[in-house]
Amino acid sequence: MLLSIVVPVFREEKNIPEFLRRIRPILGEITQDYEIIFSMDPSPDRTEEVVLEEREKDSRIKLLKFSRRFGQPMATLAGMEYSRGDAVIVMDVDLQDPPELIHDMVNKWQQGYDVVLPQRRARTGEPWLKKLVAGTGYKVINKIADVKIPPNTGDFRLMTRRVILEVVKLKESHGFLRGMVAVVGFKQCLIPFDRPARFAGETNYNRFFGSLRIGFNGIFCFSTYALTLSTQFGFVIAAASFLIAMTYLGMKLAGFPFPIGNPTMVILILFMGGIQLISVGILGEYIGRIYEEVRARPKFIVDRAEGFKAD
């Protein structure tokens, strides 16, 4: 049994030694046949050097370094594509994904589950704004998307080899792993846990806008509901405009005085303009994603690969 651990890293030199100190004994209790793949965007600190120093002590530690910064989603997909394990666990290096859960995840895999998802009960150290955006995002996505994504789950998960092969075959450029795994399907289960705070340093991920971008990927990449909603808004506004026009006409024919002037026109113009811009923006989100898919640019470019065979 070969077990692969995929760890996307960027500016994480302080967390890597403690991460390895905690995860090695746990992996050793499960199997000696494992690999730890650090999938790294070029970092301004000593992240690369720290990984290579650890690799000198243990050849099961491997490094993927990219030609430029491609972002955490692409780093995760790259590590999955280069992995060779019968099962692959994706997790963060900051120890917010507790290595101690690996035992339970492997047990669930051995019971026949293809995807094991740790589900957060508590999110220690995260600001209320991120919790609000995440909670709202999961509700909206599961309400309108074509696939169901368990709430309060992240990229931290175990996937069997056949799940990895199917996810890699999707070739989607957004890298929204939660949605891609949901599209693939197979037998899944949840493990509840309390997520601790980071071990060291500050997150390299933009809390608000990063969560918002992930949420948009979940909405626009796995549902066309936003386009339908835009059309529905158009019909509602057209109907409201017709009713207002009929009301004005009736009042005029009845000789009832009513104010018509600049305020009315300004309100109507601003309202209509706002709806039009929202509709164009929704359309632009879909067109932009179509453009990204049609370009078919590589999701990542590897500058350095340490510990991998030529194939």
Image (tube, rainbow, N blue to C red):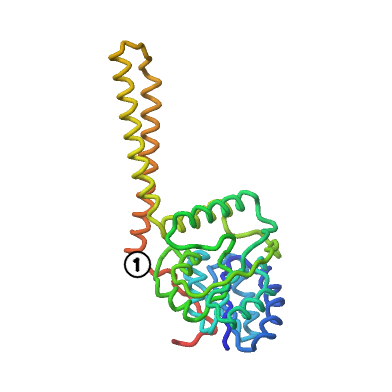
* Residue 257 pos. (x, y %): 36, 11
The answer to whether 199 is drawn above or below residue 236 in the figure is below
- Image coordinates for residue 145, horizontal then vertical, percent: 44, 58
Q: Is residue 51 left or right of residue 267?
A: right
Q: Secondary structure at mark 1?
A: loop
Indicate the quadrant where residue 291 lies.
bottom left
Image quadrant in which you'd find residue 166: bottom left
Residue ID at (62%, 80%): 106
Quadrant assignment for the N terminus: bottom right
Front-most of 279 and 43? 279
Total marks placed: 1
Residue at point 48% right, 54% down? 143
Name the spot of residue 50 as percent of width and height, x first. 64, 75
Asked if residue 287 is positioned above or below residue 96 in the image, the reply reads: above
Please say if 125 is above or below 1: above
Q: Residues within 10 Å of mark 1 (few under 14, many from 20)?
A: few
106 or 198, nearer to the observer: 106
Residue 289 percent location from the top left of the image: 37, 58
Is residue 294 toward the left or the right of residue 122 in the image?
left
Nearer the observer, 171 or 41 = 171
The residue that disc 1 covers is 296
Inspect the image, locate mark 1, and give the three-letter code of the amino acid beneath it. Answer: Ala
Q: Quadrant of the C terminus?
A: bottom left
Residue depicted at x 46% and y 72% = 185
